[in-house]
Amino acid sequence: MAETDVNRSRSANLKRVEIQINNKPLIIETGELAKQADGSAVVYYGDTIVLATAVSQDTPREDIDFFPLTIDYLEKGYAAGKIPGGFIKREGKPSEREVLISRLIDRPIRPLFPDGYKCETQGIVSVLSFGDENTSDVMGIIGMSSALMISDIPFNGPVSAVRVGYVNGKLVVMPDADQTEEAELNFVVAGTDDAVVMVEGGAKEVPESLVVEALEFAHNEIKRINAIQRELVEKAGKPK
């Protein structure tokens, strides 16, 4: 196949949406990677890139009384251009950070599946490039929701997330690593259009009114990201 034919095929399959968050483009793409998954999405923000994939079996399990959902967040050294230190170079068990972020992604995603859904479902978030934006965890939530939204898996989304910090007397969405270190308040907030569904983080002694303001500030940004997920569904979504 000629190179021009390959490029034409890539552009035909690729679907892309974009929004500005804190003066940087947040981009969601689908159609080029992990094509055999039920749904896949690549999320870009600054130098950070994550790939989210979602797969579900067609038949439900009758031997269980819970929803068999597994979410895995994978963060390898190559994503940051590093070789693991120490004598052992092989990949071992997930790090504590990977386990905690897997749970962070699971928490707002799990309640949005239909009641009684018992098909084995797996979501994997792989960090392809790790920048100093310090946002791979929230990008994982956005990517996983996007992958589920465009798939044929039943899912009552979208759900999105942002990190919000209180830095130098003002609220900042998606603060970078340095700003996060200085922040008097540091929250990861996830939500649908209707409500905030998860908050994780911490703060120094700040007024309760500031916490409320931070949640409202984050929710407004979340609704903007939800809107581009719906736009992606219009371009590339499968029938549910």
Image: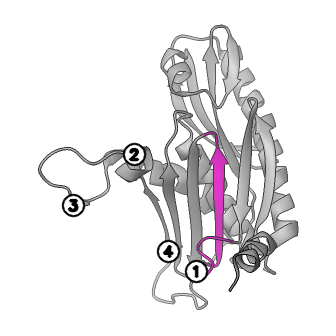
Q: In this view, does 6 lie above or below 196?
A: below
Disc 2 residue type? Gly
Label 1 vs 4, first from the N-terminus: 1
Q: Name the residue under label 3.
A: 90
Whole-number angstrom distance, CA of label 1 to CA of label 4: 10 Å
Which residue is rendered at x = 66% and y = 68% of the image? 113
Q: Is residue 120 left or right of residue 45?
A: left
Identity of the residue drawn at 76% across and 68% down = 14
Secondary structure state at the residue bearing disc 3: loop
Residue range of the region highlighted in magenta in the rendering: 32-46
Question: Which of the numbered marks, if any, corresponds to residue 56?
Answer: 1
Q: Which amino acid does label 3 sit on?
A: Arg
Q: What element carries label 2?
A: loop
Crowd class of label 1 (few under 14; some 14 to 19; many from 20; radius 10 Å): many
Q: Where is residue 17 in the image (x, y as percent from the top left)?
A: 81, 55
What amino acid is at disc 4? Answer: Pro
